[in-house]
Amino acid sequence: MFGKLMMCGAALLLMVAEARAETIEEKVQACTGCHGEDGKPVDKTIPTIWGQQAGYLYIQLRDFKRGDRKSEIMQPIATQFERDDMLAIAEYFSKKPWPDLGQPRAPKDVAEKAVSASRSVGCPACHLDRFQGDGTVPRLAGMGRDYLAKTIADFRTRARGNNPGMSDLMLATSPDDLAALVDYLAGL
Amino acid sequence: MYVKGLAAFAAAVGVGLLSGAAIAQEVKQEKQSVLGNANVPPVTQEQLNAADKNAKDFLLTNGNYAQTRFYPGKQISRDNVKNLHVAWIFQTDVRESLETSPIVVDGVMYVTTSFSHVYALDAKTGQQLWHYAHKMGPITVYCCGPNNRGVQVLGDRVYLATLDSKLMALNAKTGEVVWTTNIADPELGYSETMAPTVVKDKVLIGTNGGEYGIRGFVRAYDAKTGKQLWNFDTIPENSVGVWATKDATGRDMHRNIQAEKDMLAKIGDPYAKLGGGVWQNPSVDLATNRIYFVVGNPSPDLDGSNRPGDNLYTNSLVSLDLDTGKYVCHFQYIAHDVWDLDAVSPTVLVNVKDKDGKTIPGVIHAGKTGHIYVHDRKDCSLIRFSEAMVPQENMWVLPTKEGARMLPGANGGVEWSPIATDPGQELAYAINLHQPMTYHVESSAYPNGKLWLGGAFKVIPSEKQSGNITAVNYNTGKIKWQVKTPEPMIGGILATAGGLVFTGEGNGKFAAYNSSNGKELWSFRAGAGVNAPPSSYMIGGKQYVVVGAGGNTQIDYKRGNNIIAFTLD
């Protein structure tokens, strides 16, 4: 897995260095190396961006550029973009269909535990009904299981540092409940 | 004001989350506006001034400028309300949280939905006259659902504030956009869910964002042009205050004043990112030309360590001069709040008895603490507070890393839900939540417009939740009657001259109660959460009651998309 990740990152950096993209299609070409030609990420720890909320995608690109969200791969890519580029890229991917990763639905007991935990700290208040997200809040329904697990873990350690409110909520939720949430969200 | 979820307590409501029904909010961007032709005369300022005596229309979000939510018509009465039945149902295109207050102008009804849509309907038949589908910008930042609570009409324009923080005037007849003004930058956490209040050619609007480190405000814009006329920062540059150690009811808030003073010396006044959103309409005193509103919580909600001082004017009643926006007076309920038990329900202007029993102009407000506060309108001073309408325990224990249990939970008491009053009975009617929670604190730096809670409010899943409808005598502070409901209540309530109050529940029940004793006289099952304030009006000699049934994001009640009007045969 690590090797594949490194390859997708290396390919991207090469692409970024060699080509100064002009059109939106050229600009997003770099993204497919990791996020997938068909919207299915090449690695399970990479997020789905096809069909994701445009506002959320924009804010992440902005934060990678600012250094508020750390990623050795994403930061150099985002750094070359101005705000309008980021908004255009975000809009482009938001219009793509959300890919079905074929993840199984969570068993009933796991789903019930997840729903109870999510209501306890108010997840649907921002991620909305059925975790579809809106605006700058991401869709979580059907997101890759491993990416969800990694992101939640990173929020808890604040390694994912660009949303301390999320860190607070994840820290207030037990690891057991969070594990149920990961399975539940991945299977929606 | 932030949103806390609800523990899984009622299967009837809860299963909605698990089912695989269509994902309705996707319609929000796909739907195009449909222009129309509503045959509606212009609304004059004189009509608005006299809205409290007008049983034909329902011109303002809360009935009238005093925001009494007391409807003067009495055709629907305690005797005949049992015969109330559906007149029509209108289904909006947006199946998400529905908090709209329908207004009615000469037979035309204006309702709004989540994501800032507006519909004009024939109030007699429910037929759609036009639909404004707001083209939302990509950046929206909001904590408590994509709600919209309504619009107001003045002249031939409908005024709307949108989730992406724009103020708009629409043509009341056609739904066409007349002007648009940017209120504030949504990327920094500003959003709009409240209905504007329009008076004397001014459009008054506050802002959401208390969970995102904004600096709150109330503003007046020119109704004709959209140009800003004045701005009042709800957080003054000197936000420190008097280092109050007790709340409005005299309870110790366990502040570490020395630590706060040390921090103040180190970082200075924290006013610039201190929050102070304004969630609901101001009331307008036409006689004195003053407005009264309440200001919400400081940012971050639970962590007070980096915001020394009283954090003025958060958690306060504030009065301004209508023409200039200049400060008149304020009263702070909870200084340096770290529980988000803030002030969000609309203020109401009624005559009240002062401490000597003399009748004076008063202003009342229902808090998330579960008290109704009664003030002197002249100087904002507190005359009395009511008995607690919900259980209070362990107040004011400070939030901890592990979580400290305290009642009420952070949704209240009374949330944004407007109260109603019946001046003849000297009663205020409020709907309440009871949600046991633990309060958790974490510390982090200002996150550039991101969610900034400073911890978490956590519903305790094993503890039973409930709600209630409570009638309080505002001249004594005593509870006259209380009806318990199986679930926490959020939405609003209407009182009528027919001796009734109408309100709804998250489980879809919409009911009428005897306003003197709380006896239930009629009910209806709407099929989705009734979490919006009802309105009433008359057409062709018949009284109607109308309410939205679309559920609620904040408490996660079952979503729907219905506007339902009821009448008698």
Image (cartoon, coloured by chain):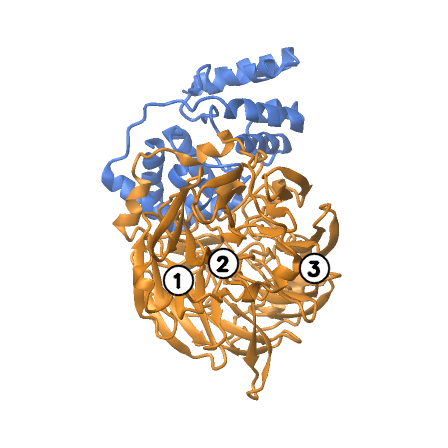
Chain colours: A blue, B orange
State the image coordinates of residue A141 (x, y, percent, origin top left).
39, 33
**Which of the two discs, 3 and 2, sits closer to the camera?**
2
Labelled pair 1, 2 in contact (Cβ < 8 Å): no
Please name the residue that numbered disc 3 is placed on.
B269
Of labels 1 and 3, earlier in sequence is 3
CA distance for labels 1 and 3: 45 Å
Q: Residue at x 40, y 24 (%)?
A: A44
CA distance for labels 1 and 2: 17 Å
Of labels 3 and 2, earlier in sequence is 3
Say left or right for B237 vs A24: right
Respond whether the residues carrying marks 3 and 2 are from the same subunit: yes
Please name the residue that numbered disc 2 is placed on.
B416
Please name the residue that numbered disc 1 is placed on.
B502
Q: Residue at x 35, y 39 (%)?
A: A181
The N terminus of chain A, quarter of image: top left
Of labels 1 and 2, earlier in sequence is 2
Subunit of label 2: B
Subunit of label 1: B
State the image coordinates of residue B415 (x, y, percent, origin top left).
47, 60
Q: Closer to the camera, B26 or B448?
A: B26
Crowding at dot 3, Cα within 10 Å, few <14 / some 14-19 / many 20+, comes out as many
Subunit of label 3: B
Q: Closer to the camera, B41 or A186?
A: B41
Q: Secondary structure at mark 2?
A: loop
